[in-house]
Image: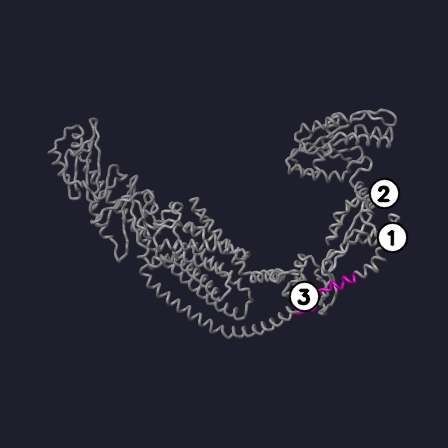
Amino acid sequence: MHRFTLSTTELKRQLLHDRYRLLAIAASLFLVLLGTDVISGWILRTPALIPENIHMVIATAFCLILYGLALPLALWRPQWRAHRVLAALVLAMATVALLEHLSGRFLGLDLPQLHAWRHDMVPHPGRMAPPTALALAALGCGLLLQPGATPARRRAVKICVLLPLLLGVLGAVAYLVNLELLYSWGASVRMALLTALGVIAAALGLNALTQLALRRHLRSQDMADSISVTATALLISISLATGLLIYRVSSQAHERSLSTVMANSVRQRAALLVAQFGISDDIARRIYQRPSVQKLLEDASRGKLDASAAAAELAARNHMTLNGIAIQDAAGRALVQVGYFETRPRQALALRSPAGSWLLWNGHYLYRTVEVYRTSAGASRLVLEQRLDMFDRIVLDTAPRDGLSGLYALCGHDDHDLRCFSQSPREPGPTIPIAGNVHHFTMWPAFSGKSGSMHTVDYSGRDVISAYAPVSDSGLAFSYKIRVADLLAPIRHDLEIDALIMLAMVTLGTLILRWRTSPLLREVLQSNRMAELAAERFRNAAEANMDAFIIMEALRGHIGEVDDFRVVYINAEAERMWQLRRDETIGRNWKALAASLNVSNHFESYKQVIDTGMPLSEEVPKAYDASHPTWIHQEIVRAGDGISISVRDITQKKLAELDLVLREALLKTVTDSIPALVAFVDVDQRYRYCNKTYTRLFGIAPEQVIGRNMRDFLGEESYAAVRPYVEQALQGQAAAFEMEMFLHGSQRYVEGRYIPQQHADGTVSGFYVMIWDITQSRAREIELRNKVTQDAMTGLLNRAAFMDILGDEIKHHYLKRQALALLFLDIDHFKQVNDTLGHATGDELIKIFAGRLRQNVRGTDHVARLGGDEFVVLLVGLDTERTAMAVVDKLMAAVCQDAKLSGELRRVSTSIGVAYAYMPDITPERLLEIADEGLYQAKAAGRNTYRLMRVG
């Protein structure tokens, strides 16, 4: 648990240390991904991966991608100036967008062809919104001014951060609360939600670069100001979020309530119209079914209609709800007519049901029905046109009141147009083309029999709440819509008052917060200033010190033991000595740091000082590197639950001591007693020293070697082998090798080391030679390896080695989708040979049998003796089963030949069990069992044969 806490603390510290760098990287990734998603959505004409992204235009998305690429360039490669080129492009595009809005002209930035498929982008498809263009222009200027080298430039960059941040927040708020519905200026600041988030992310990334460019320590006053600003911002954010949430909840609740009422009203209207149609249809049906009218229709179908009698009969049927009644022939010509028919209606719609019915409007609603009478002689039609007086009164009674923009609409449609009836006697009913406008028709779902409500933008471009319902199966639909702006107008005054109250509360809360925290902040500020002064004095002393100075804190495990140390501070000399960067070193664990530097971390010495509390002074190698030997003198002192280390480079002193030791002791005593060839070769490749092993090994006195050139002493062939290592050593790099060399008449296997003699200034005066003769140990190694893996009698693989190989080959063939075959063999009647001729003869037969097996398989196949007269052959890389059988036949022919044993010819035969596995997925032991089972079947079949067992 404690270890986890430590790792979490380390993570927090690292995040705090790199917070601005991480913020810039996160902003860059967000901008690039967001812009890429938007552009792909526009080009492919598909919804973007992130909701609402498609409301961002391509120019804005491209600017965000450029800015996202510029942030990491400014972070990691500011000297390239590439980020300024990208920032200039963003500034140029934003300026062009602003000029388009100011001049009203198209300047080539909008790409309208790629945006035209979105009908809600008119009248300027693809044009960047003015607040977005202004924000991007400020962001481009801010990045161009980076880094802020002067106070004026820093103030300008700060403005370039705050302006987009303010525009982004205002645009997001306007989007979330539909600010344009409350205030006319709301549309001028509104942004698509993710456009606003992209602008905010870009502003935060620019702010992170600004903070990194300052490159200063966090002072106490900065911390105090940061606490006050953070608390104030948090208070404002909470208040703003709460107010927005309350507003949205209340407005949505009001909208849902109104939608329910509107939906009920629309359904009631539809039901009343259906009822009115039912009454009119009933009147038409009763007139049509009267015998006298049926008689007239029959006479009309036969061409025998008496016009005067028909007019009298129809006049008797006419009453006040009928506008007109007529009898027509099959072609639609009026034979007799009573009353008046509307010939020039301002709107007319054919209904789906009943057939032949029409709904007309010319200041009031008319319902025309047609009843067809058919006889064997022909057909005639009874046409009635009725006034819908009750529906006229309903329309008049439900006209919008209280200043709301409520509007009922009764509409139908044909193949091309949506046709609606007007609520005003003075206005014609609108006829709207269907193509391209379906998504703006608020009653369109009702034509499919659905009823409900929606919040949408209608054909007139107004943000409305609409309810819709079908009028039975007539093909008509009712809708009722209210502008959201009119709906929200009554609560705008309350919202303004609430906003003022919230502003007053935030201001009061901020003042109280500053009043209550000021004494504590002043006290902390004073303490921190004193601590900073002490730290400043310490840093000045440490930086002026000629010794490397490191402070580390102890990291303890769950039982309290010191597991590691974390670097807290290093001075400039420590950076130079270990070639470190301070910002990359502070905060890292010492063990990992020492491993990456390839230096000894002296952890036990550090731990000893922590455990005992006693200081430690010692001289130790800085790094165990023979090519660049260096030494340090370090003094370790406990400091709290940590240590401070003062380190001084004593390499020159130690090198002088080492030279002395090598000349007087090592070269004269130690090297003569070790079983290795030791010598020193100068830069001219001449021997300047050699030990007595040369005499013992080659019979050559040291005096005969010293002064000779390496090429002359070793010979051309051996010198050519070691020449690369000689050149490497003379360049100051240690060299090691193992090779066979022909030395003075014998072939030897040696291990060698060439260690350069390098001085403090980097020059090399020669190198030390250490050669070990490992010929005998090499031979013993080969002999032991053969004994472990080979059968002593036959020289074939033994059981253990074969089983290892079999496991590897099974895995290999399974992965490669190849086949293999395992052959299990023994010598027929082998026991009789042992019993009659003796075990020596049996051993001789086994050797003959093994030789025949080995000679008749490929070099890639494996042959092993499991014991006694049992052998196995592993055939690998088979393409077909036929290939395996061919090898088996070959082995049978080769093995089953007479052999001369104890002076007489004896017949030799074998039985074979074959386990053939295509793409084997089996254990080695199981495959061996299957081959053994095949062997027993071969023996049961009379021996001198084989049996194939397929695996899988």
Task: Find residue 548 and name its label.
Answer: 3
Residue 287 position by quadrant: top left
Q: Earlier in the sequence, mark 3 or mark 1?
A: 3
Q: Quadrant of the N terminus?
A: bottom right
Q: Residue 841: horizontal and vertical position, in percent? A: 86, 30
Q: Earlier in the sequence, mark 2 or mark 3?
A: 3
Whether residue 676 appears in this view of the structure is no
Dot 3 crowding, Cα within 10 Å, few <14, some 14–19, many 20+: many
Give the mark toward the camera: 2 or 3: 2
Q: Secondary structure at mark 3?
A: strand
438 vs 570, left or right, is: left
Residues at circles 3 and 1 in contact by the CB criterion of under 8 Å = no
Looking at numbered disc 1 in the image, what kind of residue is underneath it?
Answer: Glu
Q: Which residue is at the front of the view, 686 or 873?
A: 686
Q: Earlier in the sequence, mark 2 or mark 1?
A: 1
Dot 2 crowding, Cα within 10 Å, few <14, some 14–19, many 20+: few
Q: Which residue is at the front of the view, 284 or 52?
A: 52
Looking at numbered disc 3 in the image, what kind of residue is underneath it?
Answer: Ala
How many angstroms separate mark 2 from mark 1 (CA)?
Answer: 20 Å
Residue 346 position by quadrant: top left
Give the mark toward the camera: 2 or 1: 1
Q: Which region shows up in magenta?
A: 636-658
What's the residue at 31%, 59% (across, down)? Answer: 489
Q: Secondary structure at mark 2?
A: loop
| Residue underneath mark 2 | 745
How many angstroms separate mark 3 from mark 1 (CA)?
Answer: 47 Å
